[in-house]
Amino acid sequence: MGIFARDESRTELAASQVARQATASLAGLLAGLGKTRSDLAKAMGVSPGRVSQIMSGDANLTVRTLAAVAEALDADVQITFCPRPQSAGAQGCRDSDSTAVRSMGSPAHH
């Protein structure tokens, strides 16, 4: 079995969690910038419905979609992989890194 072979339901659950983290981070960034979903749609050159799909997490959030959102908002996307706390000796993500996918002005260096 390869290192990426996993129970499909666990993979789907993990994908849903990453999508929720991404959309929560995006919503926080929009609010912090004082921008609306309509503003994002205009900046991306897409329909407001497409932004609603992205923000709902129902859409398959590809790296390309995340990059397009970041470019439209003049932001960076940071993706952090960290071990789960239950793994032997693993500390997990620090509180400041608890969001696996987030948009920021510049990536943090660890």
Image (tube, helix red, strand yellow):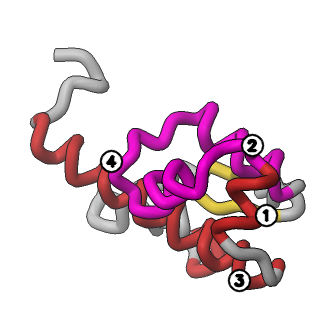
Q: Which residues are magenta?
A: 44-73
> Pointer 4 and pointer 1: residues touching (CB < 8 Å)?
no
Is residue 83 located in the magenta-colored stretch of the structure? no
Amino acid, disc 4: Ala
Write down the quadrant of residue 30 in the picture. Answer: bottom right
Three-letter code, disc 3? Ala
Residue 50 is left or right of residue 7, and the answer is right
In the rendered image, residue 49, in percent from the top left (x then y), is placed at: 50, 54
Q: What secondary structure is found at the residue carrying circle 3?
A: helix
Q: CA distance from mark 1 to mark 2?
A: 21 Å
**CB contact under 8 Å: marks 1 and 2:** no
Disc 4/disc 3 C-alpha distance (Å): 24 Å
Q: Earlier in the sequence, mark 4 or mark 3?
A: 4
The residue that mark 2 highlights is 45
Main secondary structure found in the magenta portion: helix
Mark 1 or mark 3: whose residue is earlier in sequence: 3
